[in-house]
Image (cartoon, grey):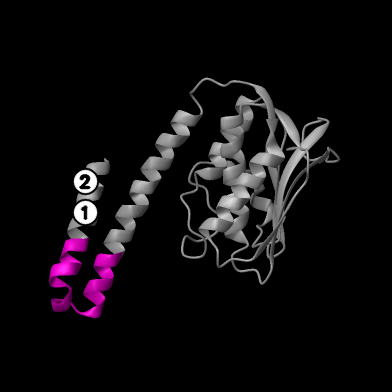
Amino acid sequence: MRAPLRSIDGFSQALLDDYGEQLDEEGQEFLQRVRGASQRMAQLIDDLLYLSRITRGEMIRQPVDLSGLAELVAQELQQNNPQRQVEVVIQAEVTADGDPRLLRVVLENLLDNAWKFTGRCEQGRIEFGMERNRFTTDYAPPVKLVYYVRDNGAGFDPAYAEKLFGVFQRLHRVDEFPGTGIGLATVQRIIHRHGGQVWADGEVGKGATFFFTL
């Protein structure tokens, strides 16, 4: 499926490069839309393949420094987006027992999500930490330790909290916040492989918090 998409993208770019001057503004915009759609489809295919692979490989449990992983991910986000000024607060000495490779994927997705949805905040803030379970919702099991990623970004309507972790599920338009709708589904599958649960709480315009247990 990738080869035809590469052809569509490539020929669309060739048309723009070689014949762009012969097209009016609307024609050029149509070709740009074709390119954008083919690129999004290619990314969607890549994400689906990744989702399939990440949930099939062997899992090796060991002690994991989640604070250290979160620091690394946050540094990468800042390096890739040097124009953003985001306050990232990471609780020290948060550890867990799990597969370090898979848990890094969890933190990458959750922190990237928080980074993305604080993009329109005057002063974005992202927190990672651990706390004692004090919840009584259907999503929060009676477990001792709960890990969380919290932000003060766009948030979401809590009525749709259950839909967040479905494949292709999005609560915001692509033109508002880009993405394929696969990241949180990946997080859920990894957490379930560890025997844990993942859930979210939020409010429109006031941020979101994603919780998980292991």
Q: Quadrant of residue 156?
A: bottom right
Magenta residues, dominant SS class: helix
Other residues around mark 2 within 10 Å, as few (<14) / some (14–19) / many (≥20) = few
Q: Residue at x 19, y 68 (%)?
A: 16
Q: Nearer the viewer, residue 97 or 178?
A: 97
Q: Which residue is mark 2?
A: 4
Q: Is residue 196 visible?
A: no
Provide the residue designation for mark 1: 8
Left or right: residue 14 versus residue 194 is left
Q: Name the image quarter holding residue 72.
A: top right
Q: Residue at x 30, y 54 (%)?
A: 38
Taking depth in this image into account, of 62 and 9 the one nearest to the observer is 62
Q: Up-down: is 79 above or below 197?
A: below
185 w.r.t. 154: above or below: above
The kind of residue tagged 2 is Pro
Q: Are marks 1 and 2 in contact (CB under 8 Å)?
A: yes
Q: Residue at x 60, y 52 (%)?
A: 75
The magenta stretch spans residue 119: no
Q: Nearer the viewer, residue 140 or 39?
A: 39
Q: Identify the secondary structure beneath mark 1.
A: helix
**Residues in magenta?**
13-32
- Residue 21 painted magenta: yes
Quarter of the figure that contains the C terminus: top right
Q: The residue under label 1 is which amino acid type?
A: Ile
Q: Secondary structure at mark 2?
A: helix
Q: Is residue 200 above or below residue 105?
A: below
